[in-house]
Image (cartoon, rainbow, N blue to C red):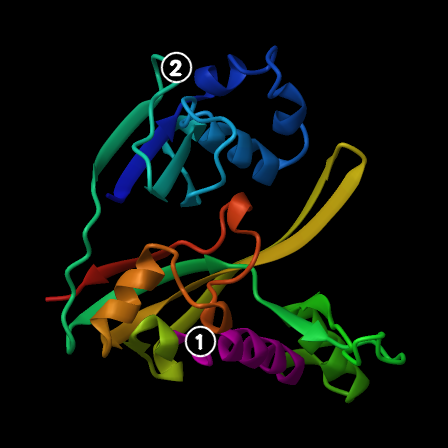
Amino acid sequence: MTYFSRITVPPAAVAALQDTRHQPALQAGDAYRDHALIWQLFPEAPDAGRDFLFRTEQGARQGLRYYLVSARPPQSWHPQVTVETRPYQPTLAAGDWVQFELRANPVIAVAPVREAGRDGRVRGKRHDVLMHAKTQGRQAGLSGAALKQAVDDAAAGWLLKRVDKWGLQIDDPELLLHGYRQHRLHRKGRDIRFASIDYQGIARVHDPLSLRQALLGQTPADAGLGHAQGFGCGLLLVKRLP
């Protein structure tokens, strides 16, 4: 069974964790805060692997709101935390039109200029797709609107080359990009940096089974929904259009 939930966390509930073991995570950056608050919803198996995807939204009165797809039903950990949960069984058919949203961490693997390792393979280093495109554009002499278009094209290209394997068909003009943000987290002596961008658009369902797997976060390795899934990226949301 899979569950879809809407979680509302008021400021008082966040403040209640300030004096607990989660206090360092709450101060390590918004993404770590979200990570800690979501894990609080699954107290019965603290050592279990992550079996959920979530997305953060700003709630009412400066509180927090999360959308969550999980293999286990979440449980409220504070009297003021509202958990609205229902079984999640997407039933979309080929030919359906949907509005979709995805917050993703699009990256590109760029192989370093060096000799291959002992196994003969040269492993690439992950780069933010948008920043990589901006660097390449500047090196090519682009600026202003032309540079922005090159960056937007790179961000759109990341999604467009994957979306078919998610069971969707989409035209580039139907794709909107917004909410680009760079995240920097520091905890336990580690610096973690990643970027996120929100994709939104209209698409046609061509493979319901592949789409169902994507909605449940079960995409194949070559058609992934991006990295940083433990920090609020990778949850594909769709709504059938009339």
Q: Which residue is mark 1?
A: 162
Residue at the image point whose x is 59% and y is 15% from the top: 18
Classify the position of the N terminus by image quarter: top left
Residue 203, compared with residue 21, is above or below; it is below
The local crowd at label 2, few if under 14, some if 14 to 19, many if 20 or more residues have their Cα within 10 Å, is some
Q: Which mark is residue 138?
A: none
Compared across the picture, whether 156 is left or right of 217 comes to right
Q: Which residue is mark 2?
A: 78
Closer to the chain start, of discs 1 and 2, is 2
Q: Specify the farthest residue to the right.
A: 114
Residue 98 location, quadrant: bottom left
Q: Is residue 46 in the magenta section? A: no
Q: Position of residue 108 (x, y in %)?
A: 64, 72
SS type, badge 1: loop
Q: Nearer the viewer, residue 137 or 87?
A: 87
Magenta region, residue range:
146-163
> How far is disc 1 from disc 2 in space, using C-alphas?
39 Å
| Total marks in image | 2
Classify the position of the C terminus by image quarter: bottom left
Q: Specify the farthest residue to the front.
A: 119
Nearer mark to the viewer, of 1 and 2: 1
Residue 190, compared with residue 151, is above or below; it is above
Residue at the image point whose x is 54% and y is 30% from the top: 36
Residue 117, compared with residue 194, is above or below; it is below
Residue 167 location, quadrant: bottom left
Compared across the picture, whether 105 is left or right of 216 comes to right
Say what amino acid the circle numbered 2 marks. His
Q: Position of residue 205 (x, y in %)?
A: 22, 75
| Principal secondary structure, stretch drawn in magenta | helix
Say what amino acid the circle numbered 1 marks. Arg
Q: Position of residue 80 (x, y in %)?
A: 35, 16
